[in-house]
Image (cartoon, grey):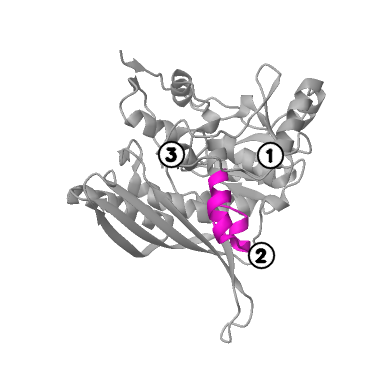
Amino acid sequence: MTRSLDGSPARHATGRHGADPHDPSPREEYLASGPSFAEGEVIERIEAFRRRRPRLRDEIVTLAHGAGGKSSAALVDAVFLEAFRNDALESLGDGAVLTLPATATAATATRRLAFSTDSFVVQPLRFPGGSIGHLAVHGTVNDLAMSGAVPQWISAAFVLEEGFPIAELKEIVADMATAAAAAGVQIVTGDTKVVPRGAADGLFVTTSGVGVIPEGRAFGAGSVRPGDRLIMSGTMGDHGMAVMLARGDLAIEADIESDTAAVGGMVELLLDAAPATRWLRDPTRGGVGTVCNELAQATGLGVVLDESRLPVSPTVNGACEMLGIDPLYVANEGKFLAVVAPDEVQDGLAALQAHSLGAEAVEIGEITEQPASNVVLRTAFGGTRIVDMLVGDPLPRIC
């Protein structure tokens, strides 16, 4: 039987913008409510476990290793970092931040660049709201924007399966050209390989990008402080659920479109309105839950999320409930998280909400000293629960 989901306005609070200044903050509410002794013991054990270096116990690669969770971290640390370790790679951010040395002809200030690369293996190749062509551009320019850069150039490499229709390839390339033009970047180099029938599932795309970081712009996990606020630029999980339902084997009908888009314009508005912004990240694989865990571990601080403020559309929420998936772990491709200084939250939210892609931007949490290196969700029932990083991904091959 086919089930349908009702589409109605997104359900979320409007953040602390306009809230009673005497209302307790998420941190005050969390500390006032506990945690109990038993919960404190659990948190201590989790902290001790996370301080250990990730260990790769698997003998073969599994889908979990590409999901952005614990298995991915173990693979990256044990295989890639072990072989390639260097200062630029160590941060494992969305892109490497590189400083060009001054030359004889440009001996004034050095220039900083961001450099990022990503591969796209989504199935199906076209889904409501976008295609692999849109993702291939948006994924890379958004990673550059999260590094503080203004994207400039992209490369594109294609692995084509023998028998892939030329007409469909032209459509995907046209999507890439449209997305690149809208993002203000040029696709300036590339490569094409063809593999035997059945070896590539149609088409794989890899893009790399370079962006220029404006003089004086610097942020990262090391800038985050207790009391800072966490903003999300829109609703969670739209892309992951759109792709999952587009596969057509779940017997669920829902009007869900991918949010795939370039977020650089929103980022620039935010940085103009909230120049003390500390940190940026787009919640792609693993969703908001995974990104918040990466933030907590990188800073050694706590991230306290408020469940009542998490922005999830009713259709996405309904689909997630039917599938038994937490929207916190479902990917976006056109949203980002930002840690901003507490006195700049309202200005930052107003700037985002003025943009067509950020109308539903909202404050979703706060950075706290405790529980150190952990993410806690303050539930609608007044309790708390730990939001851990997943081992694998319930929605494989969505980007």
Tell me the residue that label 1 is attached to.
50
Classify residue 313 as left or right of residue 307. left
- 190 vs 16: above or below: below
Q: Secondary structure at mark 1?
A: helix
Q: Nearer the viewer, mark 3 or mark 1?
A: 1
For mark 3, what is the residue?
259
**Considering the numbered disc 2 on the image, is that residue within a helix, a strand or a loop?**
loop
The residue range painted magenta reads: 74-96
Q: Residue at x 67, y 16 (%)?
A: 381
- Dominant SS of magenta comes to helix
User: Closest to the observer: 272 or 43?
Assistant: 43
- Mark 2 and mark 1: Cα distance apart in space: 34 Å
Q: Amino acid at mark 3?
A: Asp
Q: Amino acid at mark 1?
A: Arg
Under tag 3, what secondary structure?
loop
- Give the CA separation, mark 3 to mark 1: 32 Å
